[in-house]
Image: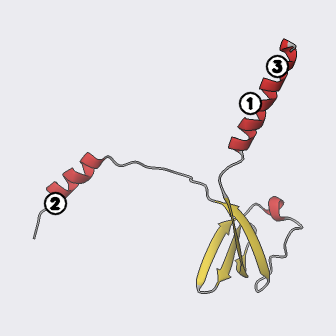
Amino acid sequence: MNPKIICLLTAASLTLNGALFAAGGKTYEITGTVAAATGSTLAVQKGMEKYEFAIDPVTIKGSAELKVGSTVTVTYVMSATKIEGASASSSKEETKASPTP
């Protein structure tokens, strides 16, 4: 087989795999009633629970009427904005340092 074709197929395979991993995490859906909507936030009431989303107006433009009381389905992904780690030894030290009543 031609080495150029092998290189091309390998590059295409790696590119597609990278795109799949960069696509993000699992998507979720929720259907509920719009409780509040501003230019950058959306609150959806589902039963007794209220879900709040940060939204990009460009993303939702034309896809939904965000009027209070209307029913919408929101598709979203969970995304971490900050992760902090605490070492196990510092937790034990804090427990030992606190006085016992």
**Tag count:** 3
State which quadrant residue 26 falls in: bottom right
Q: Secondary structure at mark 1?
A: helix
Q: Earlier in the sequence, mark 2 or mark 3?
A: 3
Q: Earlier in the sequence, mark 1 or mark 2?
A: 1
| Left or right: 21 as drawn, with respect to 80 | right
Tell me the distance, in whole angstroms, between the alpha carbons under discs 2 and 3: 65 Å
User: Mark 1 against mark 2, which lies toward the viewer?
Assistant: 1
Residue, disc 2: 98
Residue, disc 3: 6
At which x and y percent is residue 70? 79, 83
Q: Looking at the image, which residue is at 61% across and 79% down?
A: 50
Looking at numbered disc 1 in the image, what kind of residue is underneath it? Leu
| Left or right: 34 as drawn, with respect to 87 | right
User: Mark 3 against mark 1, which lies toward the viewer?
Assistant: 3
Q: Is residue 87 above or below residue 18?
A: below
At which x and y percent is residue 19? 75, 40
Q: Is residue 93 above or below residue 41?
A: above
At which x and y percent is residue 71? 78, 82
Q: Is residue 88 above or below residue 59?
A: above
Tell me the distance, in whole angstroms, between the alpha carbons under discs 3 and 1: 12 Å
Would you call the spot at circle 3 few (<14 residues within 10 Å), some (14-19), or many (20 or more)?
Answer: few
At which x and y percent is residue 30? 69, 73
Q: Secondary structure at mark 2?
A: loop
Residue, disc 1: 14
Q: Looking at the image, which residue is at 63% across and 86% down?
A: 47
| Left or right: 76 as drawn, with respect to 57 | left
User: Mark 2 against mark 3, which lies toward the viewer?
Assistant: 3
